[in-house]
Image: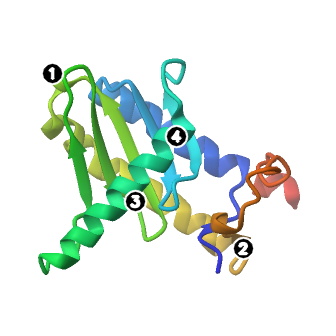
Amino acid sequence: MHTLPELLTEDIESFNETLSGLLINTEATTALIMDKGGFLITHQGDSRQFDLTTIAALASGAFMANQTIAGLVRETNFNSVHQEGEKLSLFAINIDEHCLLLIVFKPEVGVGAVKYFAVPASEKLAEQLKVARTRNPGVGIDLSMLNLANSASLFQPKPSAAARV
């Protein structure tokens, strides 16, 4: 089963534009999109001080653990997770059934402000994923089948839809 549609350059550019706007509005440090298996799709912001690949994997696991807790307390869904630290905080929100948005921010910004801007950003990201799915239905990738020893061939830039015509 394909968890992600085929993503073209225009999709990633749209994601990055949304993430950049989110960083401006929230004064966050970093924003990333990942699938729920923990694979990093794209990011914006300061990545020099973080291992984003590991953060994506662990944040996804934490989010999915909270989904399990939601079921145990008979809640249908916890659609976001907030972790507060002294120097940095994290806010993860569901984009769609396969992807998450993670925002790294300074705690003095406040989770309310981050959530306020994260909700419409996640909706915009979900819409772009929907566009990608409808562009080429049935074509995509299942990142759980990824060969971590040799993933380079999987993540190659694809030309925009206009360039393919």
Q: Would you name the residue on which mark 3 appears?
A: 95
Label whose residue precedes the other's in the sequence (4 or 1) = 4
- What's under tag 4, amino acid-wise? Thr
How far is disc 1 from disc 2 in space, using C-alphas? 43 Å
Front of the two marks 3 and 2: 3
- What's under tag 3, amino acid-wise? Ile
Residue displayed at 82% across by 46% down = 152
Residue displayed at 85% across by 51% down = 153
Q: Quadrant of residue 3?
A: bottom right
Marks 4/2 in contact by CB < 8 Å: the verdict is: no
**Label for residue 54?**
4
Q: Would you name the residue on which mark 1 appears?
A: 108
Front of the two marks 4 and 1: 4
Marks 1/2 in contact by CB < 8 Å: the verdict is: no
Q: Would you name the residue on which mark 2 appears?
A: 136
Label whose residue precedes the other's in the sequence (3 or 2) = 3
Front of the two marks 1 and 2: 1
